[in-house]
Image (cartoon, rainbow, N blue to C red):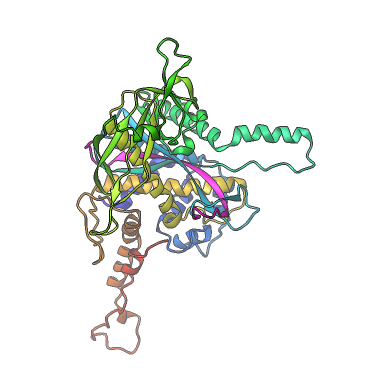
Amino acid sequence: MNLMPALLEQWDDVRPAFQQERVWERARRLGLSQLVCIERHTITGLLCSGGRQFEDWSADYRLFSRDVWEPNHLFRPVVGGSLNLLPQRGRLVMAIDDTLTRKTGKKTPGVAYRRDPLSPAFQVNLILAQRFVQFSLLVPIHAQPSSAARAVPCRFAHVPSVKKPKRNASPEHRDAYREAVKQKNLTTVTCRMLHQFRDELDQVHHAADTHLVLVVDGGYTNKTILKALPRNTTLIGRIRKDAKLHFLNETSPKKYGPRAPTPEEWRQDEQHPWQVVEAYAAGKTHAFRIKTLPPVCWRTTGACMPLRVLVIAPLGYRLTEHGRLLYRQPAYLICTDLHLPLQQLLQEYLWRWDIEVNHRDEKQIIGVGQAQVWSPESVERQPAFAVANYSMLLLAAMKAFGTDDCSELPLPKWQERLNGSRPSTQRLIQILRHETWGLALEEVTRNNPTNDFATGLDPSAKPPELILAPAPPIAYARTG
């Protein structure tokens, strides 16, 4: 099966999200242009990729500013398709993280000065950017316990900051600002999105028995999210090395027990031996040394929520074959499921890194954040629209190719085909361009030889060879 038919099937499933047929057709055309676009992914860039540079463009802008459709509805077929690909139907792992898209204008809704995550440790830099929170489903590629997983985005929402009132603002305005900060901060918005996603699983996808596992970093391992987890949901998150922990109180579950060692103290305690667990990370299976504490309570969540703490020893690596042995930083995890096997707990958390790959591909390849739109509706819906097309591409590739690259487009000479390795996003874009433009250009070149366009040549003469073939440069063009 080719990639394009599988992608069009995804768009057929999205049809109920739009009220009118013409709006759906326009959205599908812009969605395919979002993937194969070679230039900047602005609205005009998408129009040129779709061959509509000589037609009226106002309806394409109105798709994001005025037409009636809900961005979350674009992800429903993606969630349903991901559930069907799970080796364990009753367990769904999802990663949560936020990302920034750089902007240059200060008047675009949601743009504010934010800390640059790429700034060096010795100097904190500020950038103008918009903030988005993303949910990504982690779909295992193989059925083995230690295997890779692919992150498929299922939510992408704009979370702007609340503007501070002026110095001479009235007390009513200041009170309204404080209340807006409580209701519209990143953690609160994430909690609302979590409950909405859980309701969609139960009601739309009929997956009420599916256990949802959330893997998050330290920014989302806090009291607000832990105390507001939806039903049938487990959280695996990262905590500080000096977290204040207590053993459970056997007499009263509402009171803290004796003080437990901090995660760092537990790591340095040599009386408790390390356990060796294998897990997949960074392209191969590693042997991790771990320690686990008995059920404890964390001061942040209170005495009524027992947690399991996992300490991961630093992993050694070498930059070169004969280089010196270096070590990464240790990691400290907590889990709300006290009976989850250690290998499964560690593996599911290691899958979280793939959401960082999503962020890189979305901004560098798909062009999220490059559209120059200013209306509040377009600012929220156009990036979500681009991410939804990225999700459809990943899901269509898993359905069409599985875990192998079975495309007719050969790899370049300098790239090796690795057995069992999944095709990258850049590779999927190249395959899609080959199926849409490359084959069409080859057909045109075959049916219209070069001498048909020349004058003054003998029709029986051999046509001159093309110096540059038109199809390969388009198919192998790299975005970003």
Q: Position of residue 97 (x, y in %)?
A: 46, 41
> Residue 339 appears in which quarter of the rendering?
top left
Residue numbers of the magenta segment: 119-145
Residue 395 included in the magenta stretch of the image: no
Residue located 23% across and 84% down the image:
462
The front one of 81 and 332 is 332
72 with respect to 159 (left or right)? left
94 with respect to 125 (left or right)? left
The front one of 231 and 18 is 231
96 with respect to 400 (left or right)? right
Q: Position of residue 304 (x, y in %)?
A: 46, 18
The front one of 333 and 443 is 333
356 with respect to 66 (left or right)? left
Residue located 55% across and 38% down the image:
186
The front one of 322 and 459 is 322
Q: How many marks?
A: 0
Q: Quadrant of the C terminus?
A: bottom left
Q: Position of residue 161 (x, y in %)?
A: 61, 42
> Residue 440 appears in which quarter of the rendering?
bottom left
Above or below 245: residue 465: below
Above or below 144: residue 26: below
Above or below 450: residue 91: above
Q: Position of residue 111 (x, y in %)?
A: 61, 50
